[in-house]
Amino acid sequence: MEQVSNQVIEQPAGASPASESRPGVRPGHNGPNLTPRAIAKAEIFSEGDYVVYPTHGVGKVDRIAVEEIAGHRLELIHITFEENRMTLRVPVPKARTAGLRKLATRKQFDEAMTILRGRARIKRTMWSRRAQEYEAKINSGDPLAIAEVVRDLHRNAGQPDQSFSERQIYESAMDRLGAELGALDRTDKQAAITKLTDFLNAA
């Protein structure tokens, strides 16, 4: 049996418990600053929506259903992340505090693109501290914060002096931003990453 009633539940994609299907509705999010799972604004979710979960990125709402978990009847949002073959089940009352949100608007993404064109702002602190800040920005799920990471690390992308951890964080941020842009443009993630890279190189 699954755990406590107020927790987000992860499971492999395709493994879903018995439930009463009930088309969806309810709360969600618009990205935070640095904290993962910052509280989101209230949104209405429906089956088929593309959504962003802070620590996993872009997924798709498969269904919203009422299920019994550890003796509690809960309305759960089922989100599938195809790339890592995982399904997340988020209790509707917890969606907002979990940071679940719909895709950024075109206007918000335009702001992210403007950030990409800006000058890199590299703090004069130890790399380990900066790496933690970059990871926090990526896990915030906020496209503007993620764009800052891409902007700051793009300068050395592919350069011989770029460390392995710098490259990993850069690629992780680019992957998140590309996934959301791809969903927004209705293209695939790789095409979106190519678009972002071309945009950065032309800056």
Image (cartoon, helix red, strand yellow):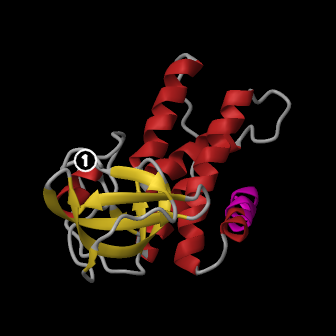
Give the number of callouts.
1
Taking the image as shown, residue 51 lies to the left or right of residue 188, namely: left
Residue 97's place in the image compared with 178, above or below, is above
Of residue 32 and residue 97, the one placed in the foreground of this image is 97
Residue ID at (56%, 55%):
176
Q: Is residue 151 visible?
A: no
x%, y% of residue 58?
49, 62
Direction top: furthest residue = 126
Instruction: Place residue 102 in its image quadrant.
Output: bottom left
Residue range of the region highlighted in magenta in the rendering: 194-203
Residue ID at (48%, 67%):
109
Q: Secondary structure at mark 1?
A: loop
Instruction: Place residue 186 in its image quadrant.
Output: bottom right
> Which residue is denoted by mark 1 in the rendering?
7
Residue 182's place in the image compared with 148, above or below, is below
Residue ID at (31%, 61%):
30
Taking the image as shown, residue 119 lies to the left or right of residue 191, namely: left
Residue 100's place in the image compared with 20, above or below, is above
Picture quarter with the C terminus: bottom right
Kind of residue at badge 1: Gln
Q: Indicate whether residue 176 is drawn in magenta.
A: no
x%, y% of residue 126?
55, 16
Direction left: furthest residue = 72
Residue ID at (30%, 49%):
2
Of residue 11 and residue 112, the one placed in the foreground of this image is 11
x%, y% of residue 25?
22, 78
Q: Which secondary structure class fits the magenta region best? A: helix
Direction right: furthest residue = 160
Q: Indicate whether residue 198 is drawn in magenta.
A: yes
Q: Is residue 159 visible?
A: yes
